[in-house]
Image (cartoon, grey):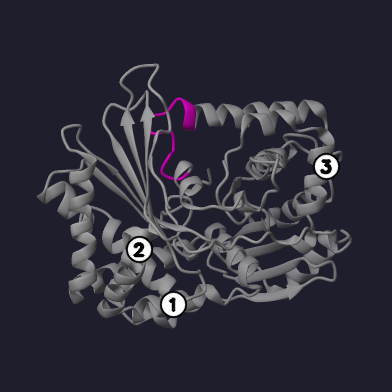
Amino acid sequence: MRLRRCCFAILILAAVCAVPLWGQQWKVPAAMKKLKNGLVVVISEDHSAPSFGLCISYGIGFRLEPEGRTGFAHLFEHMMFEGTPDAPKGTFDRVIEGGGGDNNGDTRYDFTEYIETAPISALDPVLWLEADRMKTLDFSQANLDNQRKVVEEEVRVNVLNRPYGSFMWLDLPQKAFDKFPNAHNFYGDFKDLDAATIQDVKSFFEHYYAPNNAVLVVAGDVTPDEVFEKAEKYFGGIAPRDVPPRPDVSEAPQKAERDFTEDDKLAKVPAIAIGYRMPPRTTHDAVVGAVAGELLHNGQASLLYQALVKEKKVALSVDGGLNWPLGNPFEFNGPTLMTSFIVYPPNVSEADLVKAYDGVIQELASEGVSQAALERIRAKMRSDWYAQLEMPIDRASVLSHATLFDRTPDRVNQIPDELSKVTSDEIKEFAKKYLIPAHRTIIDRVPAKSETAPKGNEKGAEQ
């Protein structure tokens, strides 16, 4: 999981509140160039500190991995830290962390990213290291076995041996969608991970870890000409590769509510996950949905928390949002859900909880939201967005994803204005159109009564 750096978030919020127009006037500087081998390079110049943030995103994520290779995108995130013939395992960490920097990586639905931050003096070594592992890896059986065990242990810790087992993001898409890209076990089935061979790993690398399937962003105390020259120096000699065509991730419209029950041997109280299918990322409806998701879920002032926890007392906690929890509401490139994850008391029935939940949704669809509440959530979302762009490493990450999806970084500067234009009437229409039972999937996760209780008992399914 990527480390988040939010030390300036409070300052950003204060600035946005003090100068309302600033958030819509400031633009992230970004210059872009595409190398002959297909690598897209983006530079964001910022001389506020003698440091830089770097992100290289590859167009391979959970939903893009081929059938029979579940978990490969995540496995490869780990494999990329196992070293190369010229930079053995540990070199990456010693070079970056030894100079006061930091590095990490993570996998999401539509990308895998690698991020670094360090003093500006480390820029050349870091670029060399990233280019080196784009060329090749140390494809040894020992490295594969080691990282396969690490990934499988993650599954045990985060899924098999944890209450609720991440069902709100792992199980829910598998029930809500029908096509393999959107509806398979993103963490990886043990049988697929155990069956992986060195040749499988090499093939995956050659197909997806190519310069023509990547975006490199450097943000910080640099100039575009300087970094474009360095990118050509370190990456320009890497040959492009044959990248598989993007799979068809489109889904047929959902026509009826899907409702399931799962037993949980570790949970002490029940929890429910509700996922609504969302409109495409590139539509204005998706921006309206992002705002609606925050109105419903963001903090104790949210509509669902106030109604279900504070007033009706049918819930213990409420979380969720559009594209939650594996990303922000703007970083997806295929079908996604607005998810509500609600833990509720054992003396409350699922039916009573859903009835109270539906009351909140119906009120939103009929009454909309007050102007004060709308302005509050729009200001917070703009503040959160700018907070992501403050630190060079996070700015590099956001720019990298936007460019990977749209082949231009411009999207990052469009979002604040689009958020500002969302109206209460649009929120109402969004709720009427998308937040309806026919578009949703529900999983009720209940404490198992015994070790022999059946799992994944389906209560109903779309006809």
Q: Which residue is mark 1?
A: 284
The residue most toward the left is 311
State which tag comes first along the sequence, 2 or 1. Answer: 2
Looking at the rendering, which quadrant does residue 399 occupy?
Answer: bottom right
Q: Residues within 10 Å of mark 2 (few under 14, many from 20)?
A: few
The rendered magenta stretch, by its main secondary structure, is classed as loop
From the viewer's side, name the closer residue of 227 and 290: 290
Q: Is residue 174 left or right of residue 53?
A: left
Judged by depth in the image, the label closer to the viewer, 2 or 1, is 1
Element assignment for label 1: helix
Element assignment for label 2: helix
The amino acid marked with disc number 2 is Leu
Q: Position of residue 79 (x, y in %)?
A: 72, 38
The CA distance from mark 2 to mark 1 is 29 Å
Q: Which residue is mark 3?
A: 202
Start and end of the magenta stretch?
159-169
Q: Residue at x 30, y 20 (%)?
A: 449
Q: Which residue is mark 2?
A: 11
